[in-house]
Every structure is written in structure tokens, then in C-alpha cells.
Amino acid sequence: MIKAVMMMNTQGKPRLAKFYDFLPVEKQQELIRGVFSVLSSRPENVSNFLEIDSLFGPDSRLVYKHYATLYFVLVFDGSENELAMLDLIQVLVETLDKCFSNVCELDIVFNYSKMHTVLDEIVFGGQVLETRSDEVMKAVEEISKLEAASNSISLVPKSVSGWRGGR
Amino acid sequence: MEQLKTIGRELAMGSQGGFGQSKEFLDLVKSIGEARSKAEEDRIVLSEIDILKRKLLEPDIPKRKMKEYIIRLVYIEMLGHDASFAYIHAVKMSHDDNLLLKRTGYLAVTLFLNEDHDLIILIVNTIQKDLRSDNYLVVCAALNAICRLINEETIPAVLPQVVDLLNHHKEAVRKKAIMALHRFHRKSPSSVSHLISNFRKRLCDNDPGVMGATLCPLFDLITEDVASYKDLVSSFVSILKQVTERRLPKSYDYHQMPAPFIQIKLLKIMALLGSGDKSASEIMYMVLGDLFKKCDSSTNIGNAILYECIRSISCIIPSPKLLEAAADAISKFLKSDSHNLKYMGIDGLGRLIKISPDIAEQHQLAVIDCLEDPDDTLKRKTFELLYKMTKSSNVEVIVDRMIDYMISINDNHYKTEIASRCVELAEQFAPSNQWFIQIMNKVFEHAGDLVNIKVAHNLMRLIAEGFGEDDDDADSKLRLSAVESYLQIMSEPKLPSLFLQVISWVLGEYGTADGKYSASYISGKLCDVADAYSSDETVKGYAVSALMKIYAFEIASGRKVDVLPECQSLIEELLASHSTDLQQRAYELQALLALDARAVESILPLDASCEDIEVDKDLSFLNGYIQQAIESGAQPYISERERSGMLETTDYHSQDHHEVPSHALRFEAYERPKPSSLRTQASTELVPLPEPSYYSEAHQPISTSSVSERESSEIKLRLDGVKQKWGRPSYQSSTSASSTPPQAANGTSSHPDVGVGSSSLKPRSSYESKKPEIYPEKQRLAASLFGGSSSSRSDRKSSSGGHKPAKGTASKPPKENPIPVQPPPDLLDFGEPTATSVTATDPFKELEGLMDSSSQDGGSTDVMGVLYSDAAPVTTTTSVDSLLSELSDSSKGNPGTYQSQTSKGPNSQEALEKDALVRQMGVNPTSQNPTLFKDLLG
């Protein structure tokens, strides 16, 4: 089971954090800081895996990937495969890339709720739900469309796709 | 260019609000991003919270604004600040009909609340409604929320709808419904146990995605109970076969691999089902073999599947061909440049080594490279592998390496782990006693405070028992070397507390045993310890006990004891210590010094720490005493269980609650009350009330059932639920248990197959000749790690603990004395006056007189319970006497003594011996042992 998904920048600022079992806010912060301090001390060109029992309890592993200014982190237990989790990060990033065309840190910060929508389509209650980024995109776009249509109070002048197309 | 783009985007978002984001949110994020310090960030966030608090109080906030506030609050809480004031607004938002608002509400609620939060109750209704919605996106949003917000109590409220959704026409909904059910199963297996068949059904879903999702709950279910899913083996194998043959739609491909995540899940399930099952394993051979051929090892996901195959093969009963394929895959991993693959290779090697121990030898140089890699993760994994392949031939090299690494790291968590592994290996494979003690010293020195206390106890036990062979000479040599090394180490500053405890204990037991060191030398050293670590009471306690033993041995052997001046001052200091434990030890020591040789010898016999102490759990030696008391009119003892059993039948209020097991919330409408049935039920439960027993049988205030039970068991004391007084210290049994698993894990490699080992040396030499650039020291290391393995694989030492009982039973302590002896009358025994007083005035008769016949509820039994639990039914007539005796007694002794003596052995000499032994065994200084001191003084 996946225990947590985190994104943080290279300065340790959390950009997105989702824990699949409830943790109090202070504990979440402690874990985010703990993970960051471990990650920031890792040299370049080493493996993407960490055994992280000290923070998340026995049999906890962590897979991370460093993209530009962001760390993508997945924490999970022994019932998942490390290499596969690495690919799950790849799926997530590929999807975000399609979503925001050339994703960067700012997209993640400013589109907080959309990030969660994307993530919820990939990981559901701690289990891998979908790994085809096209399918995820389809679902997310459908939601966006419907949200825009149902939006009688007209929150956003343009839908996401329109905004994306503008650039 | 990139920068321009982002600026442009920011501008665009600033004006348009982006994906629902406003200028304010943008500003907030920007200012936090620009904050130079955590303090500055906190200030920004706090002022933002103030603003939001104010804004939320405004009347008639437009929904659009509200949504924006909520998003800002979610963001603030992610940064670690409390946003609880807005939870209710998030809950309200989830009630909205507008999908966008609803989704935002759900998102905020799932991030804010835990499943036991009070506000959840306000959402359950909304979730119920949304699950029935026509719009599948609304249903999905609700399912998403369920995973986080539903707890055991609320599961029944949504369960029917979720089960209905398993047949929804949209596969996305079916998939999520399966996952939600899985989540329920994880939270409370009993609530969905009747629905498990649904998972099997969904395995045959038309949509491969739904089938894939079903594998997640099935994996959990099979982990819990393999046997009932054996029938699915061939189904799983055929699904995997179809997947690998690319029968799934092309859209399921990921990096040219067909549905890799489904393959991995299937392989994991197969590993569970095939474990230890030959016939199930055989069905899997074909598809596993195919996978090795088909997997593309150039992609990450291909390697993930390959690794999963290796893992499965190590779990099932493999065929030689598959093992070979797995070994090939591992060597590819290990030879790769990627650290990730090396990690997987080492992991796979660790798994396969259990089945074929020789496999490591082909890869020894790769393993050593990993050991010296800068990557910590890889290094630790390699240590894990080494730990698994340790045998007596290579234990020295491996443990030395582990200790070096242990010293080099700062991570306390891992330090603890590696220290305990070192200890375990050293205990199991130690080539010599000297080496063992050295290793233990190093471990304690560098990780002393992190080591489990069991390890220290284990070491003491090992030194006390020796290494098992009935060779007293070797044992005493071991002890001497321990004493010598400790005397040397003691001078070093700042030793960990646990280490000092071990040192003190060993010096106390064996410091003077060999005659090499004089008592005054050892006791001087012990005083130094107590002085240097004066803030550590545990260490001081150990030191004082050790001193006591040293002096006891001296007195017992007839030598004159000169108490060192520093020792005398230490005792005096401790006599006035704030710690009652230290005080008591000091008093005991003082008392012991005044006794003659014979008494001292029976209190603290030489080297008796491993003698077994037989505990008479029935306290049968008291039988005579009790018999006498009963004959003279005392009430027999009624165990607590019997008393509480009576309570249960009496208290019919509790029966009422049984109708609704565990006050669960109910979400359906109230039922119509059924008064008649309730009353009949209540009245039937009233029947077994032991109504008459209270007043008709004056002497037996208990129900008839318990009377018969008591008759059958005669007049023995009942000890159920009574805390064992002279139990064995619990660490002993648990340590011997903890030292066995590694042996079992390594057990497979222990078969002495010399032939295979020597033949496997050949490929190694050819491998070495191929690579001439290998450093000689690496080769040496490799040779010491892997070489020589074939010769000495069988000579592993039996772990400690196995030899223990032999020694223990050989000489039992003088304790088997079933003949009860009357307690000497001069002892101010608390139990005594009660027995006599009972004959004079029966307290129960008086009590029963007071009791009204109508008071048959729990209250009256409670009174009895109080009386009995006091063990001595002291009533007004006797209480003055006993109080006086107690006062006079305690004024003589120190305040730490206890007076509750009723269950103690009647013979004071015997009790003294017992206590001495217990004290020696249970070196735990916190154990309360009040009687010894009292007896000594008395």
C-alpha cells in the first residue's frame, strides 16, 4: 500500500502532500521535514530508493525522483515493488506534463486542486488505480469540462484546456 | 526564455484567476515563496489566517469567494498551520450541488478531517446522496471521499450503495467501488466479510482495469488466508499468460510492456499461493519461464517485472531451470551501472541465497563493490545480504565491517538495528569467547544506549552460563577475560549506562572469582563507577548490588572484610538517598555486612545466578495454614473471577446493552419500540439471580454455582489473576526466543554439502582471471567473505539458550518444601491477627446483619469484593490491633518496607533464601522486594 505522496522543492517547501492514512498536521510536517533532510543529503547518481523505517514505521520504503527543482516522493510498504513505484512517479509526471504542457513547479503550486484531481485518478486510497496517463487525462478533462459547465456562477472565464491552449 | 514564460503565466493567472485561483492566492504563494526564513513564512501565514478568519465571519459570502478561501486554507494547513476554524465551512461546501464546489469541499474535507472527527457525521448524509447520483463524476467524488472519511461506525451507512456500484455501467465507478470496498476491508474486516465473494466475481469483469483493481483486495485477502484461494491459482496463471501474450487492448501498454502493473500484482499473488505448495508452483513454471524470455530488461518497468519474477521464484518451490534463469537475471542486475538495479540485484540475491546458498559466490566482487558504494541505501541492503549469508567462517569479517559502519553513521535508528544484528551474529557464530566479548564491548561502547536492554541481559546470562559445553575451565576463562576487558574499559569516560550495568554486574559476580583481583580492588572500581555516574540511579543500583556480592563472597569464604572508606561513604550517602530502591540496597548491604558467614552464604551463594528458581504457583505450602484458619472459622477465599461472575448475573442493566453491540451509530430511521418483548427478556435474565443465597445461607454469600465449583477444588488458594510474585524474569524467555529466528533463516545454508562448495570455487577463479584489474585487498576481502565457506559450513555453533536447562535442573535451589510451617509468633505478621480475630467475631455475620435482603444489586457484592481483596477481612475489632502493630513495625524499619505479607512463605529463613536468589536472578533494580529487608531486621 502507498502511504504517502509528496512533492517538495529543493528548498524543502512542500508543494503537495497527501497521506493515505490520517496523520495530524504536526506529524505530517515532521515527516515532510524528515524526508527532505534525508533526500537533501543524498549524493547525485545514487539509487532512488530509501529504506525509511525510522520515519514511517517498519517495512517502509521510499522512492523519489528529482526533476529540476522538485522532488517527487512516494512512501509505501513491502507489498509494492520499488521499480514499479519509480515508474508510477514517471506516470504521474508524464500526466502532469500533458496536463500543463511542460510542467514546472509553479503549475503545481497554483493548481493545487487540480493536482489532487490528477493524483486521485492515479492513486486511490493507497492503491494504484490507473497507470495509463491518457486515461487519467481523459478523466481529468471530463471533470474540468463538467465543472465548467455546471459552473453557473462562472468562476473561471476559460476552461483549463482553453487556458492551456493559449500558451 | 523559460523565465519569460513563467512570468507570462503568472500574469495570466493573476488577471484571470487560473484554475479557480485568485490574485490573493497568487500573492500568498508568491510571498511565501519569497520568504527568507521560516519565521518570516510563519508571520505571513499567520496574518493570512487572521484575514481569512475575519472574512469567514462576514455574512453572505459568495460561493466563489468561499471556494477560494477554502483552497487557501488547505494550502496553509499543508504548510503546517492550523486551519481548524474553517473545517465547518469545508463540510458545508461539500453539500453544494455545484460539482466544482462539491469537489472542492470534498477535497478540503479529506485533507482536513480524520475519520473519527465529529464533523464527519454531517457528511455521511451527503455521501449517501452522492453515491446515488446519476452523474458518475459525483459518484466518483463521493467514493474518493469515502476512502478517507468513513470509519468502522459509518461503514454500514454507505455499504449498500457501494455494493450496488459494483455493477455500475461505468468501469471507472466499478473500479473505485472495488477499491472502496478494499478500504473498508482494511479498516474493519468484519464489516465486509460477507461481501468477499464480490471480489472474486469482479475478477471476471469485462474491463481489464476493473480486473486489475480487484487484484489489490485479493492480494490482501490471500495474504491473510492462502488456503481458501488455492482454487484461483490456474485463473491467475491464465490471466498472466494472456497479459504477457498481449491479449489486452493496446492502451494498457506502458513503455511497450503489456499492463505491467497488473503483471506485478499477479506475480505477487502467485508468490503467496505457490509458497510451500509444489502442485501450485508447478502450474506457474511455464508462465514464469516465458516472462524471463519476454521481459525487456532495457526499460525500468521491464526490470520491475523481472525482479518480481525473481521474488516469486524465491517464494514458490522452484524448478532448477527457473532458478538458473533467476540467477542470470540477478547477475545482469548486479553488473548494471544503475544503482537501482544493483539494489534490486542485492535484494534478489538475499532472497535466492536461502534456496541455493552457492549463488552468492559468483557475485562476490559485485557484492563487495556495493559494500563500498557511496550510496547508503545500497550499502545497507548489502549489509542485510551479508547478515543473511553469515556463517562461522566469515563472521569475523562481516561483524567487523558492520561495526565499522555502525561507528561511522549518525542515524540512531539504523545504528540500533545494525547493533542488534551484530550481537545476534556474534552470539550465534562467535569463533571464540574472547572475540565475542570484544565485539560486545565494541557494540556497547559505540551504541550502548541504543541497544535493547535484552541484549545486555543476554550478555550477562551468556557470561554466567558460559558457552554451553560442560567445560568449567573454559567458562571461567571467559569470565576472567570479560572481567579483564571491563576493568580496562572502565577507565574510559562517558560509557553508556547499559554497558556500565553489565560491567557492574559481571564485576560483582565474577570480579573476585578467579582470585586474580582482590576484593578491595574491585570494590574500589565499583565505587568509582557509582561516583562518576552519580546521576544514573540504575547504574548506582547495579554497583551497590555488585558491592554487596563482592562482600558476601568475601564473608562466605571466611576472609575478613575491610570496607573501603570511599565505599563506606557511598553507603552512607545512599542510606539517605531519595530513591527508595537505592536506599533499600544500601540498607541491605549494611545489614549483610553484620551477618555471619553461614547466613551470608545462603543469601548470596557464589555463582548462583543461573540456578533455576522453582515457583510454587499454587502456594501449596500455605495449605496447612489455611486449613487451620478455616477450621477455626475463617471464610474460604473466593477468587475475583467468581465474585465478578456473580456481579454479571446480578447486574441486569448491562444485559440491556447487549442488544446493540457496541453503541454503533445508526443511520436509518428509528424502529417502533417493542415494549413487551423487552420486558420478557429482562425478566428471564433476572431468574438466575442468586436471591436466596444472601440471607438464607448465612455463611456463604455467593451463588450456588460457585459453591459447587469451590467444593470441587477443595480449599486451595486460587491464584487466577493474581500477579506472580516470584516469577522468572521475563527477559530470559524472550531473549532465547529472539535469538532463534536468524538461525532458522540461515538454516537452509547449513547443510554440509562440501562437494558442491568446492566445485563452485571454479567459476570464481575463472571470473577473477577475466578481470585482472581487481585490487588485491578486495580479493582478500572476497576470499574471507566467500572463500572457505565450503569447508566450514557445517560447524555452526548452537545458539545460546539450548544448553540452559541442563545446568538449571542439575542443582535446584533448596526450595521444595511443601510442608507448611506455622509462622513464628514473634514475627509481626499481618496475616496472623486476622486469623485469630475471625474466630472471635465473624465479620461476615455482622455485615450480613447490616445488609438488607433487598440490596442484591452490584453494590452489595462490591462490599464483599472489597473485603476479600483486602485479603485480611479486618473489621473494627481487629483493626486497632493490626494498626498498632503496623505502626510499631514501620517505625522500626525504613519507609520503603511493605506490610502485606499474607501470601508470603511462612518460613522466614526460606523466604530469605528465596529473596536472595530472586534478587540475583532478577538483576532489575526496580523490582520491589520488600520482605528481605524486613526479615533481615526482624
Image: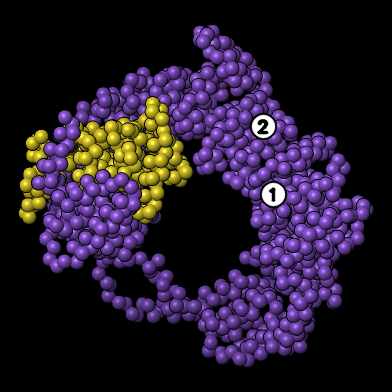
User: In this orientation, does residue B354 appear?
Assistant: no
Question: Picture coordinates of residue B499 (x, y %)?
Answer: 67, 45
Scheme of colours in the image: by chain
Q: Is residue A150 above or below residue B857?
A: above
Residue displayed at 28% across by 72% down:
B671
| Colour chosen for chain A | yellow
Q: Find disc 2 in the rendering and name its residue.
A: B429
Occupied quadrant, residue B761 = top right
| Protein chain holding label 2 | B
Q: Nearer the viewer, mark 1 or mark 2?
A: 1
At x 23% / y 43%, what residue is drawn?
A109
Query: Residue B598: where, in percent of width, then height?
Result: 91, 58
Whether residue B36 can be seen here: yes
Q: CA distance from mark 1 to mark 2?
A: 25 Å
Q: Is residue B924 left or right of residue B383?
A: right
Q: Quadrant of residue B817?
A: bottom right
Q: Nearer the viewer, residue A137 or A55?
A: A55
Q: Residue at x 18, y 33 (%)?
A: B3
* Display colour for chain B: purple
Amino acid bearing label 2: Phe
Residue B186 sits above or below residue B121 on the image: above
> Element under label 1?
helix
Q: Position of residue B602 (x, y in %)?
A: 86, 57
Disc number at residue B501? 1
Which quadrant is home to the N terminus of chain A?
top left
* In the displayed structure image, the side of residue B593 where residue B88 appears, left or right: left
Q: Nearer the viewer, residue B461 or B125?
A: B461
Nearest the eye: B10 or B104: B10
Q: Which chain's residue wears label 1?
A: B
